[in-house]
Image: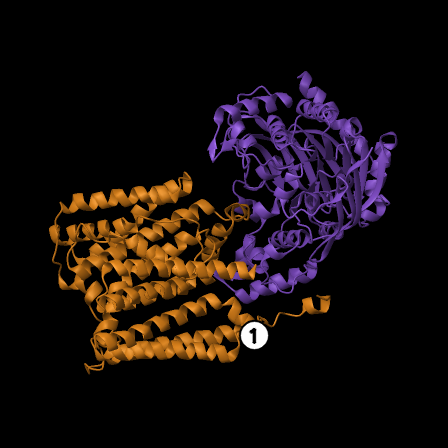
Chain colours: A orange, B purple
């Protein structure tokens, strides 16, 4: 290559762009394809509308806690670690919440922050050994998984504790009330979704403009608009459906806010960037002035807080704390992160990928259950999807060289 | 005597670099043949061609082995033919026993079941041959580096080696271990094993080698017979040109003292011994200060302990930097105080290989591309583009992952990262290790430019000519102490070596 070529900023064509973003776009397409597949099959076999307002609402209620925990798990995995304890921690914090609410009769607005603090302390207790004593996270959190499952059983005395007052239940099963009077369709929901769609397009356009200003090779414009059109249509469709049913679930709002916050944190803040650097090469990061131990510690604290939030949502949804809550959650959460494109070795993975990964798992769970596919086949299929997604990644990477 | 090996017209190119150009090497049966050349001259590449690491077809030229053309596809092929290479970095499995290591991949077994009694018996015989009396069940990690080196040779003997290649075998060894190894080489020669030794140490070469081939910038310069081997001749052939032209000219503009270190002492991180003893040094504005010393003399340990206590414990001593006494207790504080340290191992410690250039450049100063914790990716790209042009980093774009860059360009990325932290004093640890001659010259130019802008530059290097060519002043370190200090006009390879030797004797007397 001549020097003249090298001094010119690179201008990749559509093909090159698709190649370098194959992963993200591929995942989006896979999600859309899976949704359409179930839509057609469920209608043909069961005669049921897969995309009914009721089922879309269910999808979010069933998967919100996986997505919420996957946000924290992405940070843990990007930092080069793993957390196997999240299911048990969610169960334990749910049990703590139920004790405080039912046995001690504390007000909901006090209990929620208290339980979040408990989750943070649990994360700190595990993160301390991992970050400062360099004990492998696999071992520490495997121990945590057993310990907190045991503590859940002990705390609940083997029984379910519930029910809760409405305000706590609404954490999961509540809906944002329609402030604009008319009940159906729910105008508040419609407006919120429309605003969200507009915000996505607007921030995309702004990012493009800024990239152009700095001479960064932009995404081909036809492609940009096509992708945004798909996202907006999907959002408006979901919004319309939800509005015509009971409105936006509270949990959807919590989840959406968290997704935006974490996406911003990982991609646009110094601390977020440092977590990626730490996972990419810990020693180099350390010699560049990054406080690697503290960052690892904080990713586990954060994971604990999110696990406790998920624990409360699950408990609220079941309307009781049960000893068996959250069994196997850790595997769903970790699978979502890897389907979403994170690397086992740390240092890579994006929030948007994780959300899509979790939705793929969730849609498959939900679709297969509606079709009446047994839990045996469901597990096999989910396992194969996880394997296929990761093989796809590795194949791409070796092809790029 | 007939030739066991004849490499003819070997040419090997990597993207952008011609590593070997028309190299000829002829090794006679039963001799010890030394290969000399500067770092990056192409010695290791040549050996990788010979041993099949670079398979037949990935290079031009022909290899005749025992008079027949050899086309090795991989290391197994060459080992099958009796060619065994022992690399600088030992390839033993530390947690396995000596016997397990000796026959790794080559187990004494029938039908997949290992015959341990026979394996131990064979191991004992092989160990005796290399002068070791360890039990075959000893774990390799329990052995010192010198003994591990001997185990490597025993492993080669287990493969019925006919041509043994030793790549800088004594680089990490103490003096008496080195002597033992050289004795063993002579003994093996008696037994008819042909050997190739790559070494920088000219006294060793004089002691064991029958002939020497000198390689410079990827070409054969000369092959000398034993009677022609003198240090002067080898150095002349290795360097090949006037010293003045290998290093860019500079008129030093030296100002006031920028950094002063007083009585710096450091303990080993987990052994009860002192690694750095009462080291004091000064660095002035616009000055390039060298630190010379053998491997293990404590140069890197000194620099890293200074840089945010990245090495060692019980660190004592005073540092004045830019007129104040800064807190250097963590890396980020050291960076804030105006210190930067470019590590000797850029791949393991300097770069995030899987990330693009721009993210590596901004790594040590994310605040520089952020406003209140929020990154500006546009600013990040501008900064990286700026350094790409200033440093002449050869890459189509700053979005290129650094793993795809050549060593010289990777080093420029590391330098960019540290310059972006706006340091007062820059410590460069082996800044030109493993990069080609052209890129070296560019790195020297960058160093001169930095000194010209009033930075203090500290250069740690194992290559004495480089220190002599670049530095205004040279500290000589030995066993964790400053053995002496030489100005540019006083300094010579002989004076540096003499200081090291004198200090070594002092140490033994004490």
Residue B490 in view in this figure: yes
Q: Quadrant of residue B470?
A: top right
The crowding category of the residue bearing disc 1, from other C-alpha atoms within 10 Å (few below 14, some 14 to 19, many at least 20), is few
Q: Position of residue B425 (x, y in %)?
A: 65, 46
The residue furthest top is B509
Quarter in which the C terminus of chain B is drawn? top right
Q: Quadrant of the N terminus of chain B?
A: top right
Q: Nearer the viewer, residue B471 or B145?
A: B145
Q: Eyeballing the image, is B300 above or below B337?
A: above
Q: Residue furthest front?
A: B111
Q: Nearer the viewer, residue B273 or A330?
A: A330
* Residue B492 appears in view: no
Give how far across and how far down residue B488 sits, in percent.
80, 38
Is disc 1 placed on a helix, strand or loop? helix
- In the rendered view, does B300 fall on the left or right side of A127? right
What's the residue at 52%, 65% (across, down)? B376
Residue at the image position 71 percent from the left and 20 percent from the top: B505
Q: Tag 1, which chain?
A: A
Residue drawn at the location 22% of the way across and 58% of the way down: A314
**Nearer to the camera, B426 or B345:** B345
Query: Residue B444 location in percent, x, y?
Result: 74, 49
Q: Quick check: B105 above or below A245?
A: above
Quarter location, residue B254 = top right
Q: Estimate the x, y position of residue B272 in percent, counting from the top left.
A: 53, 24
Residue at the spot of label 1: A212
């Amino acid at each position: 290559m001549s020097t003249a070529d090298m001094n010119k900023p690179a201008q990749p064509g559509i093909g090159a762009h698709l190649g370098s973003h194959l992963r993200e776009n591929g995942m989006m397409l896979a999600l859309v394809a899976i949704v359409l597949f179930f839509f057609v099959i469920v209608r043909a076999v069961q005669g049921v509308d897969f995309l009914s307002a009721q089922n879309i609402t269910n999808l979010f209620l069933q998967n919100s806690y996986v997505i919420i925990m996957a946000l924290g798990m992405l940070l843990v995995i990007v930092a080069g670690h793993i957390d196997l304890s999240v299911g048990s921690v969610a169960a334990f914090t749910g049990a703590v919440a139920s004790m405080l609410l039912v046995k001690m009769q504390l007000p909901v607005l006090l209990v929620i922050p208290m339980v979040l603090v408990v989750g943070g302390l649990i994360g700190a207790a595990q993160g301390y050994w991992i970050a400062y004593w360099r004990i492998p996270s696999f071992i520490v959190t495997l121990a945590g998984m057993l310990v907190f499952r045991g503590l859940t059983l002990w705390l609940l005395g083997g029984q379910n504790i519930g029910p809760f007052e409405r305000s706590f239940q609404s954490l999961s099963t509540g809906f944002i009330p329609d402030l604009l009077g008319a009940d159906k369709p729910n105008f508040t929901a419609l407006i919120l979704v429309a605003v969200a769609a507009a915000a996505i397009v607007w921030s995309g356009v702004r990012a493009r403009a800024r990239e152009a200003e700095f001479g960064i090779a932009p995404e081909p414009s036809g492609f940009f608009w096509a992708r945004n059109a798909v996202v907006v249509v999907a959002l408006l469709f979901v919004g319309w459906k939800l509005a015509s049913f009971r409105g936006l679930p509270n949990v959807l709002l919590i989840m959406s806010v968290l997704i935006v916050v974490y996406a911003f944190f990982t991609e646009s803040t110094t601390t977020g960037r440092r977590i990626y650097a730490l996972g990419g090469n810990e020693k180099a990061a350390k010699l560049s002035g990054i406080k690697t131990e503290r960052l690892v510690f904080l990713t586990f604290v954060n994971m604990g807080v999110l696990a406790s939030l998920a624990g409360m949502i699950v408990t609220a949804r079941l309307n009781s704390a049960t000893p068996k809550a959250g069994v196997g959650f850790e595997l769903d959460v970790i699978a979502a992160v890897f389907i979403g494109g994170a690397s086992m070795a740390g240092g890579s993975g994006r929030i948007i990928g994780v959300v899509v990964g979790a939705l793929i798992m969730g849609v498959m769970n939900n679709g297969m259950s509606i079709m009446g596919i047994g839990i045996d086949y469901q597990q096999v299929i989910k396992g194969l999807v996880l394997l296929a997604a990761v093989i796809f990644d590795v194949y791409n990477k070796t092809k790029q060289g | 005597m007939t030739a066991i090996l004849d490499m003819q017209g070997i040419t090997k190119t990597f993207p952008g670099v011609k590593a070997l150009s028309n190299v000829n090497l002829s090794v006679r049966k039963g001799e010890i043949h030394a290969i000399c050349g500067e770092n990056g001259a192409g010695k290791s590449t040549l050996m990788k061609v010979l041993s099949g690491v670079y398979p037949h077809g990935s290079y031009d030229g022909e290899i005749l082995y025992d008079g027949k053309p050899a086309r090795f596809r991989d290391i197994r092929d060459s080992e099958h033919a009796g060619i065994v290479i022992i690399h600088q970095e030992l390839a033993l499995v530390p947690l396995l026993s000596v016997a397990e290591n000796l026959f790794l991949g080559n187990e004494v077994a029938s039908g997949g079941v290992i015959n341990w009694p026979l394996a131990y018996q064979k191991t004992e015989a092989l160990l005796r041959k290399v002068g070791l009396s360890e039990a075959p069940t000893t774990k390799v990690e329990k052995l010192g580096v010198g003994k591990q080196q001997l185990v490597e040779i025993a492993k080669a003997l287990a493969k019925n080696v006919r041509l043994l290649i030793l790549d800088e075998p004594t680089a990490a060894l103490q003096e008496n271990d080195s002597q033992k190894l050289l004795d063993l080489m002579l003994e093996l020669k008696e037994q008819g094993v042909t050997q190739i030794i790559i070494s920088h140490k000219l006294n060793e070469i004089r002691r064991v080698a029958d002939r020497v081939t000198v390689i410079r910038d990827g070409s054969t310069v000369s092959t000398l017979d034993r009677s022609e081997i003198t240090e002067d001749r080898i150095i002349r052939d290795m360097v090949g040109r006037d010293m003045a032209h290998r290093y860019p000219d500079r008129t030093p503009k030296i100002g006031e003292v920028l950094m002063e270190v007083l009585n710096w002492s450091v303990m080993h991180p987990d052994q009860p011994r002192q690694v750095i003893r009462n080291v004091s040094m000064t660095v002035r504005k616009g000055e390039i200060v060298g630190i010379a010393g053998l491997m293990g003399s404590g140069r890197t340990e000194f620099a890293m302990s200074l840089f945010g206590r990245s090495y060692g414990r019980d660190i004592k001593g005073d540092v004045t930097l830019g007129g104040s006494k800064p807190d250097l207790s963590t890396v980020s504080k050291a960076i804030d105080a105006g210190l930067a340290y470019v590590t000797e191992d850029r791949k393991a410690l300097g770069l995030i290989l899987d990330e693009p250039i721009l993210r590596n450049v901004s790594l040590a100063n994310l605040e520089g591309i952020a406003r209140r914790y929020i990154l500006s990716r546009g600013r990040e790209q501008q900064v990286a583009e700026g350094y790409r042009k200033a440093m002449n980093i050869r890459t189509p774009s700053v979005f290129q992952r650094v793993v795809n860059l050549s060593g010289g360009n990777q080093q420029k990325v590391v330098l960019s990262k540290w310059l972006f932290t706006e340091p007062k004093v820059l410590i460069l640890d082996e800044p030109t290790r493993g990069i080609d001659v052209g890129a070296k010259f560019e790195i020297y130019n960058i160093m001169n430019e930095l000194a010209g802008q009033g930075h203090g530059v500290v250069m740690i290097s194992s290559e004495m000519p480089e220190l002599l060519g670049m530095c205004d002043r040279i500290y000589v370190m030995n066993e964790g102490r400053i053995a002496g200090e030489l100005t540019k006009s006083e300094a010579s390879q002989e004076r540096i070596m003499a200081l090291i030797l004198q200090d070594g004797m002092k140490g033994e007397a004490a």
